[in-house]
Image: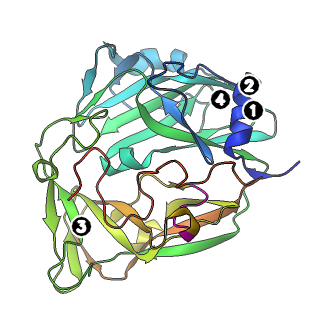
Amino acid sequence: MSYGILPQQDIADFVAQGRITGLKTDPAHPPSVQPASLDLCLGGTAYRLRASFLPGRDRTVRESLDFVKMHEIDLNGGAVLETGCVYLLPLCESLNLPEDVEGLANPKSSTGRLDVFTRVICDGGELFDHIPAGYSGPLYMEVAPRTFPVLVRPGDRLGQIRFRRGAHKALRTQHVSIDLEGDGPGAVIGYRARRHSGMVDLRGLGAHAPEDFWAPLRAPQGQLVLDPEEFYILASRESVEIPIDQAAEMAPIAPEIGEFRAHYAGFFDPGFGVAKQGGAGSRAVLEVRGRDVPFLLRHGQPVAKLVFETMSAIPDTLYGDQGSHYQAQGLRLSKHFSQV
């Protein structure tokens, strides 16, 4: 038996075997299995919380919810999740994992680019975004919009889950640095989110005018000051390529490198940036939030790292085979905005 990140064909087998249940069967929103992950669907309810939480060993999420729940929101017909609030949403999917397979959750790329902070928890969970090997039970997603209110409905997909057989073994790492030069002098090198902008409809693909939500940035001297608690979209200086037999995840290098956090959504699928998949020159788009004090970024400054690990098998479908939104990307906003 091969170890590593499970490919889409193994995820499909889990569905057929009843190890993943509750997937949406609506023809308009069929299950979305990526080359190395499964998109997770929101259920029909959201709970407004007064605090984030982890249930801890031997406690269910439902048992813990009563202490922190403020009120319940029906998502049928659509509901707005407000900035500055924390919500818990039961997910459609439930798991019954083999004893040697664990789950790893992460926001989808478009979710991170909207500055919507998400984390998955499960019954007995002691870590966010980690589903223990052999887990059997429901899944829940904590959702906290940071910059834009978002309109959500049942079946919307804010997060994704990977499955790993065996222990985590990093093959290699690649450091990622910031591009503050772009296409040359005077070029737009990033975007800063506008405060007090409108609502983003998660199903409104290409339906939002970027100028209503984002201010373009330039860095004529190859330097940019990050303001505390402001949100930025920037691009990596390096191109990124994920071999077809590997998967990768973006992670911060270390908290001591500066007063900011880079990259909330970190899964990179096999085939991303691969020339034969139409991805030559693909950059990593970085979601950056300033913290505590203003911080000066320089062109080429390292801000994050890619951690590569092996796939247990090459996926039947690779990133780019299905018209992937962010293949061959440079600096790019989420798919909800008409591209500039």
Provide the residue designation for mark 1: 13
Distance from disc 1 to disc 3, alpha carbons, whole Å, reads: 41 Å
In the drawing, does residue 107 fall left or right of residue 184? right
Is there any visible trace of residue 96 in the rendered image?
no
Q: Earlier in the sequence, mark 2 or mark 3?
A: 2
**Model colouring:** rainbow
**Judging from the image, what secondary structure is the residue with disc 2 in?**
helix
**Judging from the image, what secondary structure is the residue with disc 1 in?**
helix
Up-down relation of residue 250 to residue 29 (above or below): below
Q: Earlier in the sequence, mark 1 or mark 3?
A: 1
In the orientation shown, which residue stands out farthest toward the right? 1
Distance from disc 2 to disc 3, alpha carbons, whole Å, reads: 43 Å
In the drawing, does residue 164 fall left or right of residue 82? right
Residue 20, picture quadrant: top right
Q: Amino acid at mark 3?
A: Gly
Q: Position of residue 248 (x, y in %)?
A: 59, 60
Neighbour class for label 2 at 10 Å: few (<14), some, many (≥20)?
Answer: few
Task: Look at the image and give the residue range highlighted in magenta.
Answer: 269-275
Q: Earlier in the sequence, mark 4 or mark 3?
A: 4
Provide the residue designation for mark 3: 190
Of residues 310 and 31, which is closer to you in this image?
31
- Taking the spot 81% from the left edge, 52% from the top edge, the residue there is 3
- Taking the spot 49% from the left edge, 66% from the top edge, the residue there is 279
Between tags 4 and 2, which lies in front?
A: 2
Provide the residue designation for mark 2: 16
Provide the residue designation for mark 4: 57
Q: Earlier in the sequence, mark 4 or mark 2?
A: 2
